[in-house]
Image (cartoon, rainbow, N blue to C red):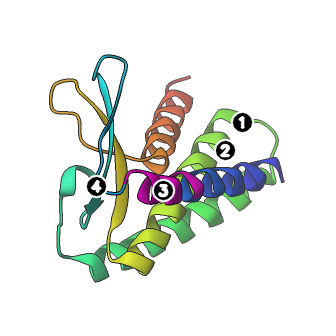
Amino acid sequence: MLFFISIIIIVVLDRLSKSMAVKKLNDKTVYLMKQKIQLFVVENRGVAFSLLTGKIKMIIKVSLILLLAMIIYLILLIQNEGQSLLKTGISFMIGGGFSNLVDRVLYDGVVDFIYINFRKCPVFNFADVFILIGSLMILISALI
């Protein structure tokens, strides 16, 4: 049950942050930490690094299939003891993936608004952060 609560919290956090970004950053850029972090709204019509831009229907279908597979796998994992890191990682990926899927269905793209001025860092959102952290947790759980 805890894993599904974390999914809900991630979705709510991401939905609220995107909504606030769209309302407060309307055509503005906010600079933080001596311009190392910038907040501005962009719409990503692709996936990570704007790959597959313009292929929204395919992205939605693949996202649905992957999310359903992860949910089924999480349900199966929860029935057994242990593997908390793996379960948490999958939960983080489901929460982030679902919230980005909602954007794609509602707006034909994902709202991104956080930019870290470091090398070629893409603009991202909190859902992306949870997907990344979840991926790292899954990788670490496979190695230990």
Q: Amino acid at mark 3?
A: Lys
Q: Are marks 1 and 4 in contact (CB under 8 Å)?
A: no
The spot of residue 2 in percent (x, y) is 81, 48
Amino acid type, callout 1: Ser
Of circles 4 and 3, the one toward us is 4
- Amino acid type, label 4: Asp
Q: Is residue 115 above or below residue 68?
A: above
| Secondary structure category for the residue under label 1 | helix
Quarter of the image holding residue 47? bottom left
Residue drawn 37% across and 60% down?
111
Residue where numbered disc 1 is placed: 84
Which residue appears at 35% of the width and 57% of the height? Answer: 26
Query: Mark 2 highlights which residue?
Result: 87
Callout 2, which amino acid? Lys
The tag earlier along the polypeptide, 2 or 4, is 4
Question: Are the residues tagged 4 and 3 within 8 Å (C-beta)?
Answer: no
Do the residues under discs 1 and 2 have CB atoms within 8 angstroms?
Answer: yes
Kindly identify which residue carries mark 4: 27
Q: Position of residue 43 (x, y in %)?
A: 28, 62
Nearest the eye: 75 or 98: 98
Residue span colored magenta: 16-25
